[in-house]
Image (cartoon, grey):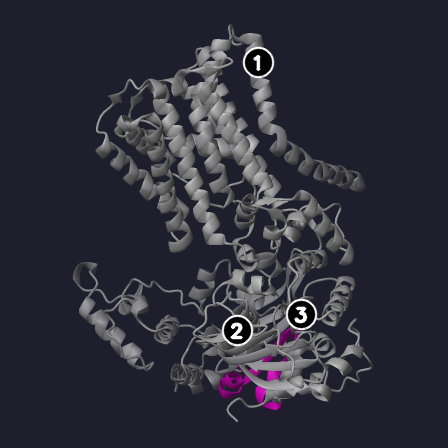
Amino acid sequence: MAELTSRGSARVAVLKPQVYAWVQDYGVYAAVLVLLLFNVLFTPHFLDASNFRTQLVQVTPVVIVSLGMALVIGTQGIDLSVGSVMALAAALTVLYLGYGWLPAVLVAVIGGAVVGAAGGALVAYVGVQPIVATLALLVGIRGLANVLVPQLVEFRNPGLIALGSSSVAGIPVIVIIAAALTVIVLFVVRRTTFGRQVVAIGGNRSASELSGLPVKRVLLTVYVISGLLAALAGVLATARLQASDPTSLGLFIELSAITAVVVGGTPLTGGRIRVLSTVMGALLMQLLSATLIKHNLPQSWTQMVQAVIILAAVYATRKRGTR
Amino acid sequence: MRRTDLAEQTDEPVLEARGISKRFPGVLALDGVSLALRPGEVHALVGENGAGKSTLIKVFTGVYRPDEGRLLYKGEPASFGTPMEAQRAGISTIYQEVNLVPMMSVARNLLLGREPRGRFGVIDTAAMYEEAERVLAGYGVETDVRRPLRTLGVGAQQMVALARAVSVDARVVIMDEPTSSLEPREVETLFGVIRRLRDSGIAVMYVSHRLDELYAVCDQVTVLRDGRLAHTGPLAELDRLKLISLMLGRDLDEVRSGGMTRFSRDRSSENRQGDGTRTPVVEARGLTRKHVLDGVNVSVEPGEVVGLGGLLGAGRTETAKAIVGALPLDGGQVLVAGMPLRGGSTAAAIKAGVSLLPEDRKAEGIIPTLSVRENIALAALPSLGRAGVVSEAKIDRVVEIFMRRLRIKAASPHQLVSELSGGNQQKVLLARWLAVRPKALLLDEPTRGIDVGAKAEVQALIDELAQEGLGVLLISSDLEELVEGADRILVLREGAVVGELSGDEVTEEKIMATIAEQSDG
């Protein structure tokens, strides 16, 4: 009897880590698949191209921002400033639109990189905690963006409008850009020295230092990339809106991005970056809210379901970590 | 007067451990340790790394509960749930880092919770300052008690902590390396205070690695080794050499019949002659850092294994860290193959060809979230690719070579390094360094905490690497390993080199004798 129970529990103990590992590795994909299937069966017009396209376009900024967020979280950091960087990019874009849309976009992206560099320098060289450093930027940069462009400004620059609304082979340019960025970040993480160093620093900073890695420079670069991507997201969102709106653009997007990263199974404790799963995490959240809205459930329901998913994702990640 | 009361009244221990055992996952930190602390004695607690000192202290102060055994306080069975409970009962602990409130005034810190109150329960600040000044004067601290505590020197802060501990009616005061950051003058003051505590019937437990201090202030001594009680008794009956041999676990009378280690001593005859004609591959000159290193000179020639001997806290690890630029220095210089090295940069040291295998494998060595393969390739990454893009094929090749050469046992190169045994993790770290083709390796306790088989393999590897011309600096608390592995041994004490042994002098007895010499002599 006693022997039987102990053997039974031993089998459970052997099985459990595998289950957790599976949930952590493929849970997001499975969840997205289940939701898609549900919608195909029960949501009218779900497979319509226009609906599909709208969903993708809406989720693009979160996807782009969460790519940078995944890198930062991989180093055990966090970047709260991304929403404000989007706003700054919107302001800079419209301010410099007189020089043509490409130079304006360039200025906006450089602006984002500079903000990222400021946060990164505080974290890497001054030793400020990432949450504090980027919180300061979250507040300050939003203010700066509002000073530059105090109210909503519409524009009629054909180039910028085209960037936001045109399609190639039926796929919106915005979505293509997001997909390309995903591929680039994936390549950086998996195949470059820099990517390996990012993960190593997140996994064990003092070991990385003793191994001669340029820890500070890598940390700085990670925040620069995050700022750069956030600015790009800001530019694309502005192009789509056909208006610059620094007051409300990107509000709370840092939370959506962190959610995407966490739901994708990247642990907040660093040392691991899951790029594709992060994108899946963003898609899952988008799909979830779209589904519930289509079935006439209020937004508050979406939020509560999202909370459950976040907790479930964190739980699965934690189990893997303690093994 | 209080002393006569207490001392004559009873010789009963005020705090007693009986057969205390404490287990952590994978380690038996304390194994049936018994120890009695009597009123009016200063009791030294000594032991090397992993001996169980801090675990025992934490049992005494309510941080840990023992798995087995009993704790008696004032003759009654005691079980402190929290450090706070132990403190209220009268057991005060003074840590190296003072645990007071740095931003509050000295006086507030001293009298926290017992401030003199005036009418309406308002703190009577004037009375508080007066009281604080009076108390501190008794400890030789003269300062403006209105200043925030953090503006005081470490020594003075420690006095405040001590004064506070005593004034809350402590019966037992435990001091964990209280002098590690004190000036000699402050140490004298501290000793004065300790003697006064003793004379007033308080039991003091004193943890330190500095032998001079132990003999200056302690009456009793307890030696722990590998979680067991190695000795307990009056300190006066133990000479330094005997004390050191108890700490290091080497029996002086032990007849040594050849080595248990895997070092072959053949090469020593040909390499031993330090004729000084060859350029040292690493040379450290006058490494100095306040309270840690005091003008340390070390040089390692190609093909030579230089051992660093000394007790815990003697500055061995710090010397190695300073050489690779991982420890900020106040002075000194490091030369690699004759070329001065830029200080404070581990990357520069590695580039020049000097790497450190750190003592703490978990905290400073492995990247637990990465695979065996990624861990091995980590330091060599820039050379294993082109234009910042890694070459998987090159990594595979290097990883395969070293996994085979070091016989790393893993399910596959893609297994998480954190899932390997300690010995295999250590081999992964050695592989990480060998992959950058160093000129010299600094090995800090390379065989600690790994199984016997892996230990022998690592020792054989050190031999082999030296024969191939690598310079090795070997730090080990295992005297046998040090003696059999090293061609030459530098003995450190309190941050300074106090002896160099070479040739026939490289024996365990000689090392212990060198450590034991009076440092003031």
Q: Position of residue B415 (x, y in %)?
A: 70, 45
- Separation of disc 1 and disc 3 at Cα? 61 Å
Magenta segment: does it hold B214? yes
Q: Chain of mark 3?
A: B
Q: What's the distance in space between the residues labelled 2 and 3, CA to CA?
A: 36 Å
User: Mark 1 and 3 residues: CB-CB less than 8 Å, in contact?
Assistant: no
Q: Amino acid at mark 2?
A: Val
User: Is residue B422 visible to us here?
Assistant: yes
The residue that disc 1 covers is A38
> In the figure, B175 relative to B199: above or below?
above
Q: Residues under labels 2 and 1: Cα distance?
A: 67 Å
The residue under label 3 is B226
Quadrant in the picture for the N terminus of chain B: bottom left
Closer mark to the observer between disc 1 and disc 3: 1
Task: For mark 2, give the secondary structure.
Answer: strand
Residues rendered magenta in the picture: B210-237
SS assignment at label 3: loop
Q: Position of residue B266 (x, y in %)?
A: 80, 78
Relative to the observer, which residue lies in front, B496 or B272? B272
Three-letter amino acid code at the position of disc 1: Phe
Q: Please, is residue A83 above or below residue B110 in the view?
A: above
Secondary structure state at the residue bearing disc 1? helix
- Kindly indicate whether the residues beneath marks 2 and 3 are on one polypeptide chain: yes
**Which residue position is annotated with label 2?**
B334
State which mark lies toward you, 2 or 1.
2
